[in-house]
Image: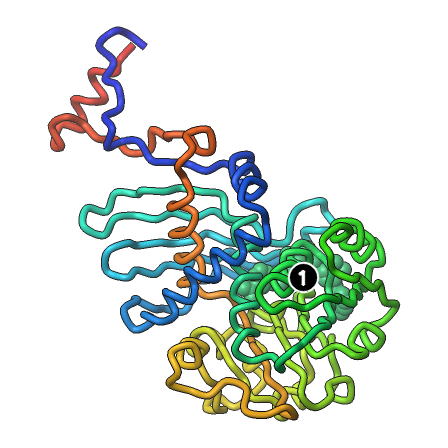
Amino acid sequence: MNALTPQPSHLAMVPFVSVANMLKIVNRIGPAQMIAGIAAYLEDDFRRWEQFDKTPRIPAHSRDGVIELMPTSDGEIYGFKYVNGHPANMARGYQTVTAFGVLSRVENGYPVLLTEMTVLTALRTAATSALAAKHLAPQGATTMAMIGNGAQCEFQALAFQKVLGIDTVRLYDLDPAATAKAVRNLAGSGLTVVACASAEEAITGAQIITTCTADKQNATVLTDNMVGAGVHINGIGGDCPGKTELHRDILLRSDIFVEYAPQTRIEGEIQALDPDHPVTELWKVITGQAEGRRDARQITLFDSVGFAIEDFSALRYLRNQLSDPGEYIELDLLADPDDPRDLFGMVQRARP
Ligand SMILES: NC(=O)c1ccc[n+]([C@@H]2O[C@H](COP(=O)([O-])OP(=O)(O)OC[C@H]3O[C@@H](n4cnc5c(N)ncnc54)[C@H](O)[C@@H]3O)[C@@H](O)[C@H]2O)c1
């Protein structure tokens, strides 16, 4: 670089949260506290749902998985997430889900945040699940069964402990090593953690059932006879065409709540139902425009697939936590010549 090489202007610099810095932030705030913080932002954004641009996410499907873009905007801020879902990845030593995301100013299109979102997605998914359960789960629920003990599992458990006040989780995974990992990680959380040998054993005595398995097929993690009256099902693993977790008969006995119906009809458990089967969008429950749980015997199902506004809320939350310069770096991301039209001159002036 010679002395005349232009230095980036302050407008070129975008705060970037690396994985290492995300881990610092999560540990400074505490995972459960951060989930509760994101849940509060989610609740605010769900209350102003109608202000947002909404579109089903844009998928690129392949034999092994999917890569998706998830955009939204509230008119002032624009956000998107890049995320993949590859159930076969784990066996190859990769994560099933990885992500990064961006927030930008709508008025000039300049990004104001670039961040890892693999960890942030787990936190926001847990926050969304707990927020839904706050409105749908039976009063005084103490016990949650968790079928699928992979990457999302502990985040979900902590969210339900913090936001719902559950005290017990009953874990089951096809792979006992996944359950053993979750038992280890949740030691010291204050939760009573019970490792179970089957899904049937895990759901015994549970008022809430979370399904968070990954399989690129229509799996049957829960059959109809396993689901008794009054439970709340938090189904997060069925989130792609041809990738579901629940037997159709369970859906027919449940009151079904979704994030954004046009996307969930493509990706959620309800892809197994008629396209006009009644479902309620969660934001309507949160704003009091629709009923959540009505009675103690009702089965409620939160058919979660993950929606762009949830990532927007998580990004907004994160941006407001970035006070310590040790927790992000300024990335020279935007070419911003002094004369906005002189992009080529900027290239020339940088010649070695
Ligand atoms: N709804 C959302 O917003 C959202 C967000 C993130 C992830 N997800 C989905 O949640 C699921 C879990 O994600 P993850 O990151 O924890 O995946 P992961 O691959 O880390 O874990 C999945 C676990 O499920 C287990 N499993 C698979 N089939 C099973 C079965 N029939 N019974 C019991 N266990 C079974 C696997 O052994 C594995 O341990 C994925 O399908 C992912 O796409 C949804």
Report x, y in % for residue 2.
Answer: 28, 7
Q: Quadrant of residue 51?
A: bottom left
Question: The C terminus is located in which quarter?
Answer: top left
Report x, y in % for residue 292.
Answer: 50, 85
Residue receiving disc 1: 157
Q: Nearer the viewer, residue 346 or 202?
A: 202
Q: In which quarter of the image is residue 216?
A: bottom right
Q: Can the viewer see residue 87 in this picture?
A: no
Residue at 71% in and 56% down: 150
Report x, y in % for residue 287.
Answer: 38, 78
**Label 1 crowd bin: few (<14), some (14–19), many (20+), radius 10 Å:** many
Residue at 57% in and 65% down: 163
State ligand 1's quadrant.
bottom right
Task: Decide if residue 93 is on the left or right side of residue 175.
Answer: left
Query: From what the image shows, is residue 147 above or below residue 270?
Result: above
Report x, y in % for residue 174.
Answer: 81, 64
**Mark 1: secondary structure:** helix
Query: From what the image shows, is residue 51 above or below residue 298?
Result: above
Q: Can the viewer see residue 100 in this picture?
A: yes
Q: Nearer the viewer, residue 91 or 259?
A: 259
Residue at 75% in and 66% down: 169
Residue at 25% in and 16% down: 350
The amino acid on which the numbered mark 1 sits, given as a three-letter code, is: Ala
Query: From what the image shows, is residue 85 above or below residue 102?
Result: below
Question: The N terminus is located in which quarter?
Answer: top left
Task: Decide if residue 87 is on the left or right side of residue 287.
Answer: right
- Report whether the residue tagged 1 is closer than 8 Å to ligand 1: no
Toward the right, the furthest residue is 197
